[in-house]
Amino acid sequence: MVIWYECKVKYTKTFETGEQKPVTETYLLDAVSYSEAEARITEEMKAYTEEAFKITNIKVSNISEVYTFESGDRWYKSKIALIAVDEESGKERKTNIYFLVQAGDVKEAFDNTNEAMKDTLGDFSIPSIAESPILEVFPYFTGEEEQLEKFNVLPKEEETETETAEA
């Protein structure tokens, strides 16, 4: 299970006009702990700015999935209500989950959310979609296993292979 962390970073941004202003920006990344999230956002921010920066907040996000689409330039948070019928009472129950989808506008975000949900077997509705303050998403990619080892964490299949090789 991926745990997404929202990280807010404050720094002085230099705009195309040459004007400098302090800004606070929100980024999303997956990590296994707050410590790792702090280390990863620090590394990512070094590529974004040469200015000094301060991590002002790190929190676990309620986002369960992130979907990138080439046509999008902004991130939208979609609230999806999964609908199930309680067999005993016959009442309808809704469970909310949240997706982050990339899109150009709200309509495209709605279409992209439906696309992401196309393989869902159950009924669902999309009660809300809103533009997110998140500017960039930093997921793990293959090749970052060294980073996981640094924090003494290995993916499950690698743990099994390592344990087998040591035995």
Image (cartoon, rainbow, N blue to C red):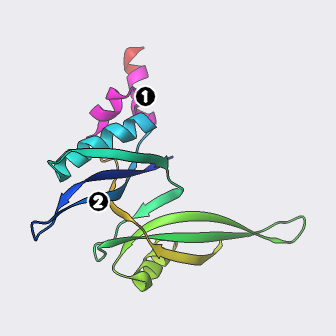
How many discs appear? 2
First along the sequence among labels 1 and 2: 2
- Considering the numbered disc 2 on the image, is that residue within a helix, a strand or a loop? strand
Q: Secondary structure at mark 1?
A: helix
Range shown magenta: 142-163
Q: Is residue 140 above or below residue 99?
A: above
- The rendered magenta stretch, by its main secondary structure, is classed as helix
Residue 2 can be seen in this image:
no
> Which residue is at 51% across, 74% downward?
118
- Quadrant placement of the C terminus: top left
**Residue 29: assigned label:** none
Drawn side of residue 46 relative to residue 16, left or right: right
- The amino acid marked with disc number 2 is Val
Which residue corresponds to mark 1? 159
Q: Where is 23 relative to 158, above or below?
A: below
Characterize the local packing of mark 2: few (<14), some (14-19) or many (20 or more) Cα atoms within 10 angstroms: few
* Magenta-span inclusion, residue 94: no
In percent of width and height, residue 150 lies at 32, 27
Query: Mark 2 — residue?
Result: 23
Q: Amino acid at mark 1?
A: Glu
145, 104: nearer the viewer: 104
